Amino acid sequence: MQQNMHEIIQNWCKDKHDEENAYGGLITYGGLDFENCEESIAYVKVNRLPRWQFRLSRVAAGNYTAAKEWQADTASSFIKGPSDIISGMAKALGAEYNQTKSLYFIDCNSPASMELGIGSRTYTLTAESLIIRVDEKLCILALSHHRGNPDWGLGAPFIREYCHVYDVDSQRVGFAKAR
């Protein structure tokens, strides 16, 4: 399919969130970045602009699964979702909620992972993107309650694993595995 490159914006986020003063990623305007992103791009229609919202049909972590149609966007530093589902997923991954700090703490060596059903594809997020190391022994799970909002914010953990391609004229967003 012929694509007018001026309609494309692509972003890639480096997965080294524990480095200081490091190159953090790249936004490409008018083209595609196949140096940092794989060439296979799966697109889904955007159903709410200007927030680039799309449908999220399933989430899973550990032995916890929830299936329903939700709206999702990528404007968050954590994965944000409905409180009951985030709590269930965090518990299934072995994380403990600290009410004072409003954070989930998790074993730094946890093999935590989660799956997101978007369109006809399943996207897997690994521990490298989901666990934020605060120091040698203290780690945070990058899940957060989206208080009062039934929708999802997929944010930085998702962007670290999957490049995002914003196709403006076709009103769709695509995802490609980051290299």
Image (cartoon, rainbow, N blue to C red):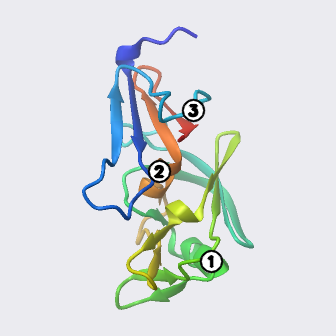
Tell me where residue 147 appears, x and y as whole percent. Answer: 41, 72
Pick the quarter of the image with the N terminus: top right
Q: Marks 2/1: CA distance?
A: 23 Å
Horizontal side, residue 34 vs residue 66: left or right: left
Nearer to us: label 3 or label 1: 3
Q: In the image, which disc is placed on residue 88?
A: 1
Pick the quarter of the image with the C terminus: top right
Please indicate, yes or no, whether residue 50 appears anywhere in the rendered image.
no
Q: Quarter of the image holding residue 11?
A: top left
Q: What residue type is labelled 1?
A: Gly
Marks 2 and 3: CB-CB under 8 Å?
A: no
Foreground residue among 175 and 111: 111
Q: Marks 3/1: CA distance?
A: 32 Å
Q: In the image, which disc is placed on residue 160?
A: 2
Horizontal side, residue 134 vs residue 177: left or right: left
Q: In the image, which disc is placed on residue 38?
A: 3
Horizontal side, residue 64 vs residue 38: left or right: right
Give neighbour class at mark 3: few <14, some 14-19, many 20+ (Cα, 10 Å): some
Residue at 62%, 77% (x, y): give it: 88
Image mark count:
3
Give neighbour class at mark 1: few <14, some 14-19, many 20+ (Cα, 10 Å): some
Q: Marks 2/3: CA distance?
A: 13 Å
Q: In the image, which disc is placed on residue 113?
A: none
Q: In this view, which residue lies farthest toward the right? A: 63
Up the image or down, 121 lies above or below 64; here it is above
Q: What residue type is labelled 3?
A: Glu
Q: What element carries label 2?
A: helix
Q: What residue type is labelled 2?
A: Arg
N-terminal label among 3 and 1: 3
Tell me where residue 172 appears, x and y as whole percent. Answer: 49, 30
Residue at 46%, 32% (x, y): give it: 165
Residue at 53%, 78% (x, y): give it: 108
